[in-house]
Image (cartoon, helix red, strand yellow):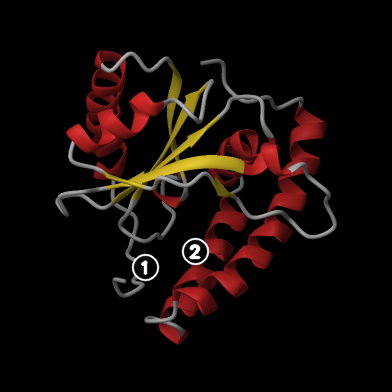
């Protein structure tokens, strides 16, 4: 496990995402995987937000059990998780486990740190990642406060990922409560693939 370090925002994150997404789309489509969309998510997708220097990518696919995913990702040099993972369920919500399921891959060769989340469009966790990104892009004060929380957590728990996320996830749930209100008030919907 690498040390948790929050860095100043970098303009090149957006360009790096485009390069990675272009490669991933071609890799998956050559393997016959139907890709609905590829989105830049997480803190590096929010201009001006301090973040871990890790590009988070969400790939919308219709079938999480597609065996071609593992083959394509392995051929592309990515580390593939064979298990279907379940995302964090915000407190006070009862969400069907299927709405939180995803597949996961990371950088396999160590060149560019990235997390690749495969989720089904229309499910709770797919929408959550996009709402998070869009809310923080449009609410500078929330993004700045979130960045400060992450910097302090990395300072306090640089080698303890469990402690880092034990605090970060509930803080993020508070931010997302505001994001849900914003989405309802503005009519926000996930972007079309």
The answer to whether residue 98 is left or right of residue 68 is: right
The reply to whether the C-beta atoms of the residues labelled 2 and 1 are less than 8 Å apart is yes
Residue 80 lies, in percent from the top left, at: 33, 44
Above or below, comparing residue 24 to residue 30 in the picture: below
Residue at the image position 68 percent from the left and 66 percent from the top: 170
- Residue receiving disc 2: 147
- Residue receiving disc 1: 6
Q: Quadrant of residue 186?
A: top right
Residue 14 lies, in percent from the top left, at: 31, 37
Q: Quadrant of residue 51?
A: bottom left
The answer to whether residue 34 is left or right of residue 11 is: right
The crowd level at tag 1 (other Cα within 10 Å; few <14, some 14-19, many 20+) is many
Residue 16 lies, in percent from the top left, at: 24, 38
Nearer to us in this view, 144 or 96: 96
Residue at the image position 52 percent from the left and 23 percent from the top: 63
Residue at the image position 44 percent from the left and 55 percent from the top: 49
Residue 53 lies, in percent from the top left, at: 30, 57
Residue at the farthest bottom position:
156
| Disc ID at residue 87 | none
Q: Secondary structure at mark 1?
A: loop
The crowd level at tag 2 (other Cα within 10 Å; few <14, some 14-19, many 20+) is many
């Amino acid at each position: 496990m690498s040390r948790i370090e929050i860095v100043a925002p970098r303009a090149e994150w957006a360009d790096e995402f485009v390069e990675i997404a272009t490669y991933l789309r071609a890799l998956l489509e050559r393997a016959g995987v139907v890709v609905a969309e590829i989105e830049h998510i997480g803190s590096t997708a929010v201009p001006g937000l301090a973040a871990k220097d890790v590009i988070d990518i969400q790939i919308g696919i219709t079938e999480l059990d597609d065996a071609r995913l593992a083959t394509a990702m392995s051929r592309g040099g990515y580390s593939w998780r064979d298990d279907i993972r379940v995302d964090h369920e915000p407190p006070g919500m009862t969400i069907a486990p299927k709405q939180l399921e995803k597949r996961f891959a990371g950088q396999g060769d160590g060149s560019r740190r990235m997390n690749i989340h495969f989720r089904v469009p229309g499910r709770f966790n797919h929408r959550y990642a996009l709402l998070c990104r869009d809310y923080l892009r449009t609410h500078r004060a929330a993004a700045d406060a979130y960045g400060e929380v992450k910097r302090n957590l990395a300072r306090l728990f640089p080698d303890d990922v469990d402690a880092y996320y034990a605090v970060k996830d509930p803080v993020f749930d508070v931010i997302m409560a505001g994001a849900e209100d914003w989405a309802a008030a503005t009519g926000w919907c996930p972007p079309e693939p």
